[in-house]
Image: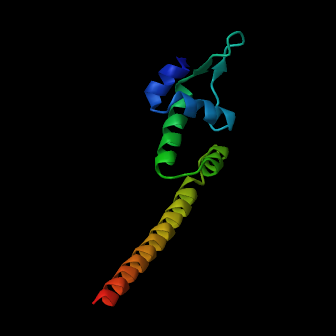
């Protein structure tokens, strides 16, 4: 069993993040001491913590991560990743359109100066 500080160092997730994940039901401590309320995590929590960290770096929202964790078999993981990929592609396309609009606006301003 790992204290929250040890588990934080082990997983790279901050203590605050671990507390928040427990609060929203993403990653419950394996044991909470009844006297001092200290939270302890076990080796089984390690994989889940690493996966949550990876999902966060991929841009998953808390709601999306909850959806992943609710599927204990992770049988829909590929589907959720493909959905996320599609959303990112759409965001990229939207940003590229904004860049094109900015470039056109800049170009029109330069033409007026000439």
The residue shown at (58%, 51%) is 61
Colouring of the image:
rainbow
Residue closer to the observer: 77 or 23: 23
Q: Compared to 75, does 12 lie above or below?
A: above
**Which residue is farthest left?**
114
- Residue 21 occupies which quadrant of the picture? top right
- Total of numbered circles in the picture? 0
Q: Provide residue 95's location: percent of width, then percent of height.
A: 45, 70
Q: Provide residue 44's location: percent of width, then percent of height.
A: 55, 29
**Which residue is farthest right?**
34
- Residue 76 occupies which quadrant of the picture? bottom right
Residue closer to the observer: 79 or 111: 111
- Residue 105 occupies which quadrant of the picture? bottom left
Residue closer to the observer: 81 or 94: 94
Q: Compared to 95, does 109 lie above or below?
A: below
Give the quadrant of the N terminus.
Answer: top right
The residue shown at (56%, 34%) is 17
Residue closer to the observer: 14 or 65: 14
| Left/right of residue 61 with respect to residue 113 in the rendered view | right
**Which residue is farthest top?**
35
The residue shown at (44%, 26%) is 10
Q: Provide residue 34's location: percent of width, then percent of height.
A: 72, 12
Q: Provide residue 20's location: percent of width, then percent of height.
A: 62, 34
Give the quadrant of the C terminus.
Answer: bottom left
The residue shown at (44%, 25%) is 9
């Amino acid at each position: 069993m790992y204290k929250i500080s040890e588990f934080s160092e082990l997983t790279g997730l901050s203590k605050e993040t671990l507390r928040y994940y427990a609060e929203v039901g993403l990653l419950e401590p394996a044991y909470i001491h009844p006297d001092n309320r200290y939270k302890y995590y076990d080796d089984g929590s390690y994989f889940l913590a690493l996966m949550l960290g990876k999902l966060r770096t991929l841009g998953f929202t808390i709601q999306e991560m909850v959806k992943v964790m609710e599927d204990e078999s992770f049988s829909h993981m590929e589907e959720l990743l493909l959905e996320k990929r599609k959303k990112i592609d759409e965001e990229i396309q939207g940003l590229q359109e904004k860049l094109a609009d900015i470039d056109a606006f800049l170009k029109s301003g330069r033409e007026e100066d000439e």
